[in-house]
Image (cartoon, helix red, strand yellow):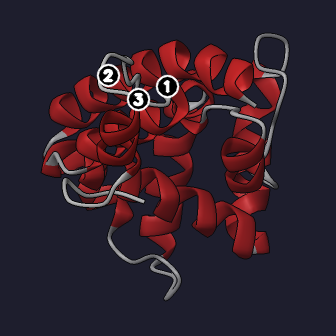
Amino acid sequence: MAGHLSGVQTRIRENYPKARYIHCASHRLNLTLSNVMSVPAIRNCLGVVSQVVNLFRNHSNANKFFKKLSKNMLQTVKRNDFSGFVTQYLSKGTTVSSCFLELFECIVMALEEIAQRTWTIFHGIDSSLSESKSEFLVNIVVCEKLFSLTLPLSISFK
């Protein structure tokens, strides 16, 4: 019930003029995240992350290359594949961006290997990363920082 004519805030003010109306914190958090997603650079960055996650989740050959390259990093990184990342990201707040940053070197090497083999599953994700790698990295760090701040809030509002 939104709106200045018959929204909740309007109805409360009509019945109780001295009452203070405080907007729901969870809704405010949602509005904040929606505003962040309206920034083209952030939206594009998360779109690239989503494409990479889907590439490694949906194609076994790409996933094999990624697992082979990330075996050496398993001591520092708890996960070695992207299976379930998107679902966990949405439901449990596991940030794709932090895992993506930790595995970035392996991701780029796997994408380069896929590009050399010229598979049809590869849709230019590597070029998205390499054309503006510094901008992409800045955006992914910003996303990771944002999600690290909003995750505890999201959990406490449940």
Q: In the image, 77: left or right of 118? A: right
Task: Pick the quarter of the image with the N terminus.
Answer: bottom left
Q: Nearer the viewer, mark 3 or mark 2?
A: 3
Query: Marks 3 and 2, Cα distance to the nearest angstrom?
Result: 26 Å
Q: In the image, 120: left or right of 127? A: right
| Pointer 2 residue | 142
| Pointer 3 residue | 23
Identify the mark nearer the N-term, 2 or 1: 1
Residue 120 vs 51, above or below: the answer is below
Position in image of residue 118 (x %, y %): 45, 79
Secondary structure category for the residue under label 3: loop
- Name the mark on residue 25: 1
Q: Amino acid at mark 3?
A: His
Q: Residues within 10 Å of mark 2 (few under 14, many from 20)?
A: some
Q: Nearer the viewer, mark 1 or mark 3?
A: 3
Using the rendered image of the protein, determine whether residue 113 is visible from the camera's viewpoint.
no
Identify the mark nearer the N-term, 3 or 2: 3
